[in-house]
Every structure is written in structure tokens, then in C-alpha cells.
Image (tube, rainbow, N blue to C red):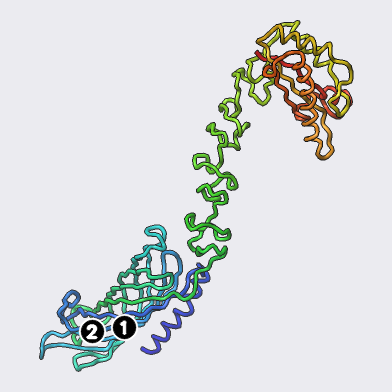
Amino acid sequence: MLHFIRFLILFWLITVPFFLLAQTTQHPWSFGISAGKTVYTGDLGNGYFDFNREFNGLGSIKIARCISPSLNVGLNLNYGKYGFWINEGEQNFSSRLFHVNIVGEYKFNNDYILPEDVRVAPYLFAGIGVSSYSPINDLAVKGTDFTIPVGLGAKIKLTDNFHAFWQGTIGFTLGDDVDFVKADRYDRFMSNQIGITYSLGNAQDSDNDGISDLKDECINTFGLKSFKGCPDTDGDGIKDIDDYCPKKVGLKSFNGCPDTDDDGIPDQEDRCPNAPGEPKNGGCPDTDEDGIIDSIDSCPNSAGKTKNGCPILENHHASILMAAQKGIRFKEKTAEFELNVNRLLDRVASLLKENTSFNLRLLGHTARDHEKGMDKINLELSQARTDIIKSYLLQKGISENRITAIGYGDSRPIASNSYPEGRRQNERVEFLIEN
């Protein structure tokens, strides 16, 4: 008997670490103690639910290790009293019981049935063990039986490391003479115990976010408990692994991406994310509804059929504007006119006076320079050139609200900047009419 117990303990100490290395090392060992009572059933009778029977006490030591979220393996050492008392002078027996077993526990708090950190965690268990009996009276038999323990229990979380527990066990023995009677029923016992366990050590937490790796869905990234250890970088309530735009606050309906202009089109699909527009225009506005989006419409407030989105003018009106556009040139990198342009601009002013429904748009452009910082300089230069033309027309009596002057810098070339002629074409001010 002693040799078998030694073998059982040695087998457990060797095999359990092997399984741990093969499956997980993220949960600590636990150590528990408990106390309760044993109840006999066999050839003499059934005392399982007879609460008037004598009390046979039992104490236990329990060592367990988590193998997976659903499985624990445990070693239980039990010592106490075992017997059955009928009446004075009748067949009675009393023994000392030593029972050792290895069990597997199926835990319901495995995140499939119940959350792993639930406060009350039920479990089922079964295993194999050995029971040794030492007689207290002459009606008991000394012996050893193989035992199959099965049962159920529940743990109650007190702290991260301490749990109280209750456990009920039925020990199915393979012997039938511990009660000094051999008949047609094997002798069995039931035990009920309450106790406390302590977890030895702390669970592994690779990213130091306070969430053990076993519960952490993002083991190597610092995260939030509300997202099972995953981060939410932009704080929009959508964890990064599910967020298509993890660095921008967004909407759940767009998988975490923003819709800055609130037009129902997420920014990453919106050609104009800062201006509300229609899906048919890629999210860009088309104020005059002429089919040309505002960003490329030279006359965004007047519906036009020309390729630049401006209204079609009568030939003599268009010729005045085209003459001004072609004839007005500036000295290189300045807002000074190359030649006298008074006659050209006077004709434009007369056109506006004669047609009070006309509004003028002046769009300034420059050639592109590859030197660092020239984008800003060219933008300012193009604006200055349109402003000087606007000032001249204001002096001629045109209302300021009828003239819009915008500089685009070098962002809208019409020819290659690699050749002098192309650069000259790009250095221009467009004259456009809106109704």
C-alpha cells in the first residue's frame, strides 16, 4: 500500500509539469485545506442522507494546477474516520480512512459557460485513487481499495489569491469487505467538505496591463480591462484590432473611422472629408449641382456646362475675359505687371457694370518650384496677384461683393513645368463669370 501511494504521488509530480509545459504556464499552483465528514453506504445500509447518524470527521489537503481555462488537475490527501453504526449489539464498524487521489476538474468558469473571474465558480471532477482502512473496532477490516472519486464543488472568490470552496465526493470502491460483510454491494463513501485555497504566485502578464495572459486577447500590447487587454488608442470605444482607423476617433457604424463632415461617408472613402457631399460625388459638395464638384469647379455657385463648371458666355463677353487672361502678365516671382494692363482691366470693369448679374472670380496660379518652402511662397504670390487685380476693379467702382479673388499657388498646372513655355502657361490669372 505504501509503495503504491508513493508511486501515485511521484507519477503526479512528474506528469503534471509535463502537461503544464505542453499547454500553459500562466496560472499559479493552488494549495487548499478543508474539513468535513464522511458517510458510508454498503451492505449494512445507506447513510448518505441520514443526518441522525454518528459524525465521522475528515480533513484534507488539496494541491491543484490549472491546465487550461476549463481544466484543473489536483492531488487530494484525505484522513479521517469512516464507519456505520446501526444499534447497540448489532453489526457496526468503525475505521480510520486514508484516501489519496488524482482528479481532473472541469471548470464552468471557462469564459465559454461563465466568465473566468466570476465570483462563484462551480466545477465537476473525477479521478482515480487509493483508500486505506485501519480498524478502530473488531467489526472493521484492515485493507486497501482502489477508488474512483467523482463529485462536484464550487469556489467562492474572496480575493485574487484566496477562495473558499465546498466539495462533495462519492468514492466508488472496488472492495466489499471493509464493513466485515461481503454481499452484493460494494462499500462506498461520500464526503462533504468546506475549505479554503490559496493561489501560489501571480498569473503571467507579458504586457504589464494588469490582465493575465490567459485572459488577455492582446498579450503583447498594453490594453484595457474593458477590452480584455486590448488597446483603444483613439478612445472611441472600439478596440484597435477591430478599428479600421485606430488612431482617429471614429464611429462604430464605420468600424472606428471618422466622418468629419457628417455626410454619411467615412473619411477614408470621402474625397472631401471636411465638406459634406453626396455619395455620387465621392463625398464632395457640388453647390451649383452642375455635376462638377466644388473643388474643381471654377464657378461653384453658378451652374455651368463648360469643363471648368462656369456658365457659357456670349462670344463678345468671353473675348473680353480671355483677352485679360492672356494679356495680363507679371514680372517673375512678383505681383507687379509686366506691361500696362489698364485697357484690359477697364474693359472687364465695363463688362461688369453693364451686366449687374455677373460676378467675377479671379483664380491665381503659379509655376511650380522644387525648392523647399516654395509651396507656401507660391500660394501667397498667386493670392497677391489676384488681389492687385481686384483692387484695380474696386477703384473702377465695382462692388467688392461681386469679386472673389483666390490664389491656388502651383497646385493646378495646365502644362508641364519642365519647359519654359509650360511654366509661362501655368503663370496665369483666370477671369471667370458667375451669374
Residue that carries the numbered disc 1 in the rendered image? 59
Quadrant of the image for the N terminus? bottom left
Q: Is residue 2 left or right of residue 339?
A: left
* Left or right relative to 137: residue 303: right
Q: Which mark is residue 56?
A: 2
Q: What element does badge 1 sit on? A: strand
State which quadrant residue 390 falls in: top right
In the depicted structure, whether residue 216 falls above or below residue 82 = above
341 lies left or right of 278: right
Residue 122 seen in the current view: yes
Q: Residue at x 81, y 36 (%)?
A: 374
- Residue beneath the point at 72% across and 14% down: 398
Q: CA distance from mark 1 to mark 2?
A: 10 Å
Determine whether, in the image, residue 311 is placed left or right of residue 50.
right
Quadrant where the image shows the C terminus = top right
Q: Amino acid at mark 1?
A: Gly
Can residue 177 be seen here? The reply is no
Residue most extreme to the bottom: 138
Q: Do labels 1 and 2 touch, CB within 8 Å?
A: no
**Residue in front for this viewpoint, 368 or 88:** 368
Which of the numbered marks, if any, corresponds to residue 231? none
Place of residue 163 in the rendered image (x, y in percent of width and height, measured from the top left): 38, 72
